[in-house]
Image (cartoon, rainbow, N blue to C red):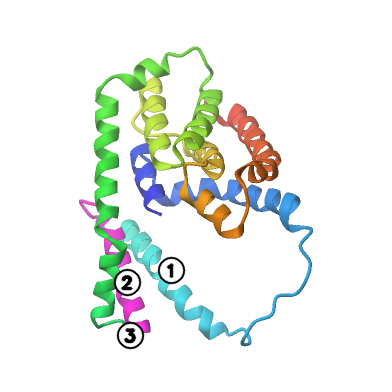
Amino acid sequence: STVLIATSAVAGISLYVAIAHLSPFFFISIAVGWLFFLKEVRGVRKYDRPFSFKGLAIPMGIILTAPAIDILFKRFIHMEVPEFATLLGVSVALAFSIAATGWWDKKLLKTGMRMKVWNYSLIILAMFFFVNVFSAGGVPKLLGELPIQDWAFMVSVGFLLGFATGRIQAPMFIIIPIYLAKLGTASMNPWVFAVSYFSVFLGYALAPAHPCVTVSLEYFGGDLRGMFKKMLAPVALCLLIALVFAFFMFP
């Protein structure tokens, strides 16, 4: 995820440390989703063909190539720019993917042009430009002086910004500099990062501004009010868990 790569870098923590600390919230989300939505699902799914371990192993192997190379190079080879390890891993995985699908012809170029892959690089550059300008302007220090506990600020403001913007990276790029400025440190506690990211994600999941919500509702014939009614209880429960977790984990 480009969002997780960028936000963990701004927070001054390793990508894999961030993933490890986010994993409890992943399992909490699964449990809450099962409790509110999936436990009533009945029936057996039918497939066109029998399950194949070989068919699963090839794509999974390609997917896992990128993080494996990234971890190995960062762990055993000193690189002036650690992100080169990530670039190498993704490039090798892409080459394996092309080899497995046989997309060596113009189809690959056409697909890349339609996807506008260069936008992802520009987005990352723009995000870092934004966070540097935002930090240099002194706004994080001013907001950090608000009379509110850190744990409540990161969870509540993160959630509200996620809901208002329909994004994850923009809210994180706002609240991370505020937290770092308030503590006067260059890196974020991994648990603080994880609970903040989870809180932003909860707001993002409800955000009408995000096209995933509106397009999905349109495709399946749903309505925004009905979606809010269904999502309110599980999101509120997850937000309460985040608040309790933050209360005990924040320094």
Q: Which residue is the site of mark 3?
A: 102
Residue 82 visible within the image: no
Image spot of residue 200 (x, y percent):
50, 38
| Residue 84 forms part of the magenta stretch | yes
Image spot of residue 192 (x, y percent):
50, 34
Q: CA separation, marks 2 and 3? A: 12 Å
Q: Quadrant of residue 45?
A: bottom right
> How many residues crowd mark 3 within 10 Å: few (<14), some (14–19), many (20+)?
few
In the rendered view, tell whether residue 248 sits above or below residue 119.
above
Q: Which residue is the site of mark 1?
A: 64
Image spot of residue 235 (x, y percent):
64, 40
Helix, strand or loop for disc 3 = loop
Q: Nearer the viewer, mark 2 or mark 3?
A: 3
Helix, strand or loop for disc 1 = helix
Q: Which residue is the site of mark 2?
A: 94
Q: How many marks?
A: 3
Which residue is rendered at x = 63% and y = 87% of the image?
50
Disc 1 vs disc 2: Cβ atoms closer than 8 Å?
no
Helix, strand or loop for disc 2 = helix
Q: CA separation, marks 1 and 2? A: 11 Å
Residue 222 visible within the image: yes
